[in-house]
Structure formats: structure tokens, C-alpha cells
Image (cartoon, rainbow, N blue to C red):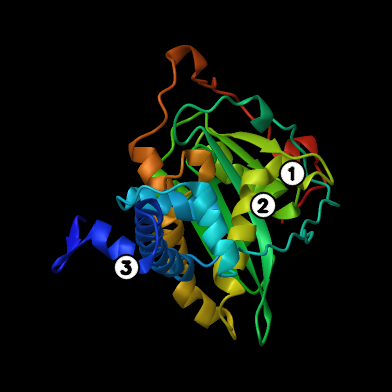
Amino acid sequence: MESQGELSVVRMCGLAQISRASFYRQLEEQGTASLDQELRVLIQRAALAHRYYGYRRIARLLRRQGRPVNAKKVRRLMHEDNLLANRRRKFVATTDSEHGYRVYPNLAKRVVLGAVDQLWVADITYVRLAEEFVYLAVVLDAYSRRVVGWALDRSLESRLALTALDRAIAARQPGAGLVHHSDRGTQYASNEYVRRLESIGAWISMSRAGRPWENGKCESFMRTLKREEIEARPYRNLEELERNLEEFIETIYNRERLHSALGYRSPMEFEQQPEPRPESERWLPAAVSFGRHEEIYPDASGD
């Protein structure tokens, strides 16, 4: 800017009794402030659309939208606008491992993931609604964090977990050698559930007692679900929750939500563009034959 109307920059600076360096510095600061205000608007929109995104995910989201931005700057602006998420951490045990069924060792910790449908992880959580308690069972693909099967019920009986498993099998059609990992709860150790896994040639893996972190991917999903969906809406009953849960899982979580462990991609995007891995690091399990529960525990009469 060499002139403003009929006045040159030199003349204007002389009249205002400021140096040209001060003039250009103020001009640059005004431009920076304008850009910061524009960035604040974008950050606020992203934070409202994704209520529990931290500053790193917001920065990634903005970069994916073509806006180059530094994560530290996003953090500063979110802090100034009180937009940083406050997360509550808690663990609620829903596992009944006092049963007579067979308990399997933890095979999941030995799996080196290189593709989908090598390792599924499953878990159950309770959901406190305004009028009642209900229960949610999920099955995730550990490689992509994608929810491949889920079910809601008012009961913790084995049919809850089995429904989620059947939906996962129908959706993915996994080959023999899949490792299925869960806790030691009676739902996952029951004869009916184990038979279903045997029918597809799966290996069975279970966490050790009192070690929920051995099923950390499922625990992480449950926390995300409760923070970003269930605690954000006043659901009254199972029917109301179920109507909205499908949209959150299938559309928001599986298709849109960015995961830091996936290079800030959604599960579906990660499955379409997986991290390249050398063939030597890919793990392929061999087939295995399981004994029936009744053969090992003759007094186990059912679920």
C-alpha cells in the first residue's frame, strides 16, 4: 500500500507522527486478527459438530478441509473460547465371570494386525436412560476400529451378545482363522456363543480377570459412544435410543469420526486406504479345532 486516496504512506505517517515500520506492523496485525477471527468461526463450527473432538482432531479436520493450520494455534484459540473438551474417565464393570464354562487364554496380544477380519473385539456395557437401564453389545474390527455388529436389549442374557455377533458375521463373512476377543463374561463363554464362533472357524480369546485394558479398543469405543452421543441427548427409553444409535454408529463413527490411531481417518476410510505393511509383518492364523463345552464340563447344561 503506497498511497491512500491522494496521500502517500510517507505523508500519512508524517501527519500521524508514526514511523512507516509501525504503520506496516499495525497493518499486518490487523490482517492477522482478521484471519484469526475467520479461523475462530471455523473452529467453533467444527467443535459444535464434533462436541468431544480435542484440538488435534479439530486441526486435522480443518487441514482436510483445505485450511492449513497449526495444532498449537487451534489449541490456543479453543482455550481462549473455552472449547476444549473436559473428559470424565470411569470404568463400570458389567462382567459376570463366575460360571462353569471354559475360559480361554488371551490370544489377541499375540496378533500382529495387517488387514481387516483378523481380530474382532467384543464387549457389553450398560446405558442409563431416563426411564430404564438397557444394555449394548458391540463387535469391532480391531484393525480399523470399525463397528461391525451391535445390538441393544433390556436383558444381559446371551442373546444380546449373540445378536451382535450374528450381525457382524452377516456383514463381514469372515474366513476361518479369525480371532474373537472378549472378556470372560458368561455371555461370551456360553455354549451357544462358542458354537457360533466354532461354526466359522474362529479362535477364541479372552482377557484375564479384572483387566479391562486387555480389551482396550472396545473400552475406548464405549467411552466415545457415551461421551459423544448418549450423554449429549436425554434419551428416555430403549426404542428412542435405538432409533438414533444406528445413525451414530453407522454414519458418524464408522464413516466420519477421525481416529488418531488411524492417522486421523475414519474406520471406513482406513479400510479403503490402510497403512502399508510389509508382507513379513502380516499375521495369518492356522485352523484349530475346539472341544465342545459339554465334553470338557459335562455338567454345563446350557446358557
Say whether disc 1 or disc 2 marks the residue closer to the N-terminus: 1
Q: Quadrant of the N terminus?
A: bottom left
Q: Secondary structure at mark 2?
A: helix
Task: Indicate the position of residue 76 as horizontal and vertical percent values.
Answer: 56, 57
Q: Secondary structure at mark 1?
A: helix
| The quadrant where residue 24 appears | bottom left
* Residue 61 falls left or right of residue 291: left
Q: Amino acid at mark 3?
A: Leu
Most distant residue in the left direction: 6
The answer to whether residue 220 is above or below residue 118 is: below
CA gap between label 1 and label 2 equals: 7 Å
The answer to whether residue 12 is above or below residue 112 is: below
Residue at the (40%, 69%) spot, across then down: 41
Q: Circle 2 is placed at which residue position?
A: 219
Residue at the (57%, 24%) spot, across then down: 112
Say whether disc 1 or disc 3 marks the residue closer to the N-terminus: 3
The answer to whether residue 27 is above or below residue 286 is: below
Say whether disc 3 or disc 2 marks the residue closer to the N-terminus: 3
Whether residue 161 is visible here, answered yes or no, is no
